[in-house]
Every structure is written in structure tokens, then in C-alpha cells.
Amino acid sequence: MGSYPITAYAACNAMGTTTAEVIAALDAGRSGLGPCPEEFGLQGATGVVPGPLPALPSALADYDTRLTRIAQLALDDLARPLAAARARWGADRIGVLVGTSTGGIYETERAYAYQRAHGGLPPGYSVERSHALHAGLHVVRLLADLRGPAYVVSTACSSSARVCAGALRLLDAAICDAVLVGGVDSLCTMTLKGFAGLEVLSADPCRPFSSARAGINIGEGAAWMLIERLGDGPARLLGVGESSDAYHMTSPHPEGLGALLAMQRAVSAAGIDPSEVDQINVHGTGTQQNDEVEGKAIRELLGPEVAVVATKGYTGHLLGAAGATELVFTIASIEGGFLPASVGADPVDASIGVNVNLARRAFRTRHALSNSFAFGGSNVSVLLGAP
């Protein structure tokens, strides 16, 4: 498996509508979490992309949804590096891999409410263009002006980390010379009330790895990374580890076997020793069980001293966009030479036994892991390296 430069990255979420705003908030330890929008009928904290969101170009008006607007917003920051990549490799040699969990469910919820009130679907609504997972892919591909292999990955909360494995395979097989990877999800009633039904939704801003943690918050956003065969960039994609423990539909394996296996495979794919991992961006949802299990797996592979960074206190859980967003955070920390604060983690739960970073500090990273775990035991760990 090759090692490839990540030449550009971008993100938007509750922390800001531009990549610069998002990274500035990360650097300052400033959370974007705020009140849940009234339309969802729930009290508590969520991560909402600040509006208004610009509409899609008129040629894509049939695909204009909250999801595609969020995808476009983050993609705007990659206009110049994408143009350079097209000129270098050709649009046919650049793939597009998109991770999403909910797709256009928000639009379908609104269409259903309209149908109940008016007896018919709202003008412009289409399952193919408004709801389907591939609708977002179609928009991203056209906005980026790319014509290489393209597909969607939907493995719940590991979706936009898992696309990194696909990118490695396309590059290793010489099918592509560059791949645009990332993910996007928008808030929707199904997700918010689903997690509320599981009794893991926190009314207050989430506190991953804290002794006071009380559950997760849900957020929305998008994040993109351009991975190329050759070039210079702020980080390199070194390896991806995947596992599927299938222990339970919504709970992780109690011994963290799937999480451990994914991390082991990422480190092995890169050909490094676990002791060479300097920091790990944890999945860190803020639920009692997830944080305990992930901590156990980290101790077993990396030991109790590796620097642990938990970032869902900034954005909430972005579901299908979480993996890519946290990879962007990790890339930014490598590039900026710092470790972000783990917002909400203080006081740390000492029983978990890991070294959670509480305050921003200067830090040199050689290798970093980023974990993304999903319902059904779909686990991904991505290993990044310094340039």
C-alpha cells in the first residue's frame, strides 16, 4: 500500500462556513455547539452550519437541498487546488468518493410533512434528486468538474473515513492519479429523535472522555481532502485499517476488538511500530460505553501515554461527515504544529486510563491515528503522517 500526499483540505460545520474559520476555532478551542433548531422539536445542543447557505448553480437547481448546499460550501475552498489537479492529471484520472449517512433524509422529512398537509409532494421534490445518496455524489462530481471513478460509501458514522481506503486502492491500482474524498451530512429529525430514543443524546454540550459525560450531540457539516499520487501537502495518507466486528446493531464490542483490529491494521499497513504514533483523534462520542471501550483498545495498542484528542465537543457528531472532518482537524494540527484542546473533557474520567489533551499546546506530530466507529461494528482507523 502506497503513501500519498494530501495536497489540500476543506471543511465547514458549526465552527464556521469556511475552512479558515473552522481551523481558527479549533486552534482557539472554541466550540460551535448551540441550541437545537426549533423545527426538530427537541431541547439540547446541536452543531448547525451557520446560514444562510448559498444556493446551487442554476444548472443544478433540481438537486438543490440542504445537504448539497453544505457540500458545496466546503468544496468552494478547494477550487484552486482542484483546478491545478485537473490541469496536472486530467479530469478523467481524478476519482470522487463521498461518505454520507443520512443523505437527503431531511428533504424527505419535509416532503412528507408537506404531503400530509397538502395531499401531494411539494414542487421540485424527487426521490432520485432530493433523497438518494448518489444525488450528493452527482453534485460534488459536477461542482469539482471531475470525471474519474465515483461512488458513495454509507457505513453510518465511519462513512467518510472509509473512503480513504477506497482512495488508497484506486491509487495503488493506478486507476486514478488523484482522488477527492470526504463526506457530508445534514441534521434531520430521524437522526436526532433516533439517538434520543436510544437515550444517548445529551441535553448539554457533549463531554467526550470526561467523568461528567452524559451522551452525544448531533451536528452537520462537510469535509473534503484531495489525495494525489505525487505532490506536496500538509500531511500524507499512510494507511487505513478496517474491521467489522458486527457485535451489535448499536453498541461496540465490550472488549473493543473491532476498534483494536482497525487500529492495528492501519499501523501495520504503514509499516510503523505503534510506539511511533504521537497522537490519536478518538471517535470519542461522549457516551459511557463508547469512550470506555475505545480507551481500552488505545491502551492495549498504543499504551496509556499517547496524546488523545477528542474533538466532537467542537461540532457534535457529524455522522457520515465525522470521519473526514476529524481527519481535517488532525491534518491541521500536523500542519500547525499543535495539539487542540479536547473541549468538554475536563475533568477526565481517570478510570479510562488514557492521556487526554485538555489544553492547546505546541506539538510535533510524526504519525497520527484518527478513529471512526459506526453502528453494526463498522470500524475504520486512518493513519496520517507528516510531510
Image: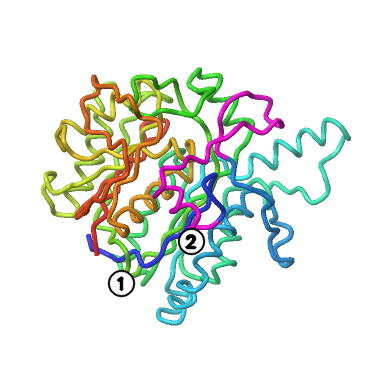
From the image, tell me which residue sits under label 1. 232
SS class, disc 2: strand
Q: Position of residue 315 (x, y in %)?
A: 48, 40
Classed neighbour count for the residue bearing mark 2: other residues with Cα under 10 Å, few (<14), some (14–19), many (≥20): some
What segment is highlighted magenta in the picture? 18-47
Horizontally, residue 287 falls left or right of residue 334, namely right
Residue 72 screen position, x and y as percent: 59, 59
Q: Name which residue lies at 42% across and 74% down.
A: 93
Camera-nearest residue between 223 and 254: 223
Three-letter code, disc 2: Ala
Query: Viewer-proximal residue, 313 or 325?
Result: 313
In the displayed structure, 241 sits above or below 45; it is below
Question: Which mark is on residue 150?
Answer: 2
In the picture, the quarter occupied by the C terminus is bottom left
Label 1 crowd (10 A; few <14 / some 14-19 / many >=20): few
Say how many tags the image has: 2
State the residue at coordinates (34%, 20%): 211
> How much space separates mark 1 and mark 2, taking CA atoms?
24 Å
Let me know if residue 22 is in the magenta part: yes
As shown in the figure, which amino acid type bears the numbered disc 1?
Answer: Asp
Task: Give me the residue at 54% from left, 68% from top.
Answer: 144
Front label number (1 vs 2): 1
